[in-house]
Amino acid sequence: MNSEQLFGMALDLHTPWQVDGVEFKPGTKGGEELHMTSGFARGSRFADANGHACPVHDTVPVPWARPGSGFTLLF
């Protein structure tokens, strides 16, 4: 298992979403920062949000933003 697969599982991503890259870089305040890129395969199809988008930000809910995931704390 590679780091992209591991982070994809941790974020509960499902097809067509995927983690394309994971990299640790020096942070601006010392330590390291985690940089991840996500994407999807060309030609992927997505379910219609059909009124489920956020009315303020016009975004569709994502699996890593679920309550208790811990991943949105530092995003």
Image (cartoon, rainbow, N blue to C red):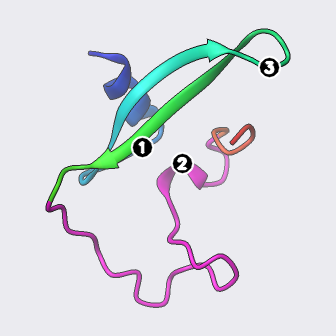
Is 55 part of what is drawn in magenta? yes
- Mark nearer the N terminus (1 vs 3): 1
Outermost residue on the right side: it is 29
Identify the residue under disc 3: 28
Q: Which residues are magenta?
A: 43-69
- Say which of 35 and 52 sits in front: 35
Q: Amino acid at mark 2?
A: Trp
Give left or right: position of 40 versus 57. left
Label 1, label 3: how many angstroms apart (C-alpha)? 29 Å
Q: Are marks 1 and 3 in contact (CB under 8 Å)?
A: no
Is 45 part of what is drawn in magenta? yes
Classed neighbour count for the residue bearing mark 2: other residues with Cα under 10 Å, few (<14), some (14–19), many (≥20)? some
Label 2, label 1: how many angstroms apart (C-alpha)? 6 Å
Classed neighbour count for the residue bearing mark 3: other residues with Cα under 10 Å, few (<14), some (14–19), many (≥20)? few
State which quadrant residue 59 falls in. Answer: bottom right
Where is residue 40 drawn, in percent x and y? 27, 50
Depicted 32 relative to depicted 68: above or below: above
Depicted 48 relative to depicted 2: above or below: below
User: Mark 3, mark 2: which one is toward the viewer?
Assistant: 3
Classed neighbour count for the residue bearing mark 1: other residues with Cα under 10 Å, few (<14), some (14–19), many (≥20)? some
Identify the residue under disc 1: 12
Q: Are marks 2 and 1 in contact (CB under 8 Å)?
A: yes
Give left or right: position of 74 versus 62. right
**Residue occupying image coordinates x 74% and y 17%:** 27
Label placed on residue 64: 2
Dot 1: element: loop
